[in-house]
Amino acid sequence: MRVITFDIESISDSVVRGHIDVNEQELTVVGIHDSETETYSSYFKEELHTLWPILERADMLIGFNSDSFDIPLLNRYYPGNLSHIRSLDLLSEVQKVLGRRIRLQALAEATLGRGKSGDGLKASDWWKEGKKDEVAKYCIEDVRITRELYDYALANGVLKYKDLSDIRDIKIDTSLWNGMASAMPAMTHALQL
């Protein structure tokens, strides 16, 4: 089973009350972990044509807030429809249990004992300053954290978060995760509808 864990960094000049409109975003970089090669890599917008074949051969995409942000944004650049690939959105899995959203930073700190290396606003500033490699490095770190959270949930059946001063478990039903990829065949070409 080939699983691609991914994250996207983007920029925009318009944010309304903390809400980010995916249609107002411009993709800057995509970071991935490929379970087939066990490697991390990043792709700037002008390199996306080399990313498409990798995603098309994936059995499943794993992300954080990926179903409502990353995949719709990436679909604006992709010549087909990436929603035909099975996806697992860790934020959605957490929200199903808690009834609310938890930031990646909070999950990482409580579950993995370490947080993110920065935040999206800082990555946006780096991009505007021409520090593309810093943005790519930050994006890859988010991919690494997402992948480690996925692996932790698979191994332990929980993710953790801090609630005031207590660390609490979020019971995650991972029983279907391994079977998700086999339920739908991988795509075979870029314009599969």
Image: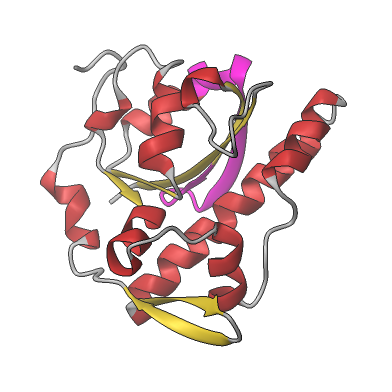
Residue farthest right in this picture: 129
Residue 131, image x, y percentages: 84, 31
Can residue 20 be found in the magenta stretch?
A: no
Q: Which residue shows up at 81% across the image and 33% down it?
A: 125
Magenta segment, which residues? 32-50
Q: Quadrant of the C terminus?
A: top left
Can residue 46 be found in the magenta stretch?
A: yes
Q: Which residue shows up at 69% across the image and 21% down it?
A: 13
Above or below: residue 39 compared with residue 175 = above
Q: On the image, which quarter does residue 71 sit in?
A: top left
Q: Which residue shows up at 70% across the image and 37% down it?
A: 136
Residue 170, image x, y percentages: 37, 76
33 displayed left or right of 173: right
Residue farthest bottom in this picture: 166
- Nearer to us in this view, 12 or 143: 12
13 displayed left or right of 67: right
Residue farthest left in this picture: 183
Q: Which scheme is used to colour this image of the protein? A: secondary structure
- Nearer to us in this view, 49 or 163: 163
Residue 183, image x, y percentages: 12, 47
- Nearer to us in this view, 130 or 18: 18
Q: Which residue shows up at 35% across the image and 40% down it?
A: 67
Residue 23, image x, y percentages: 48, 19
- Nearer to us in this view, 151 or 94: 94
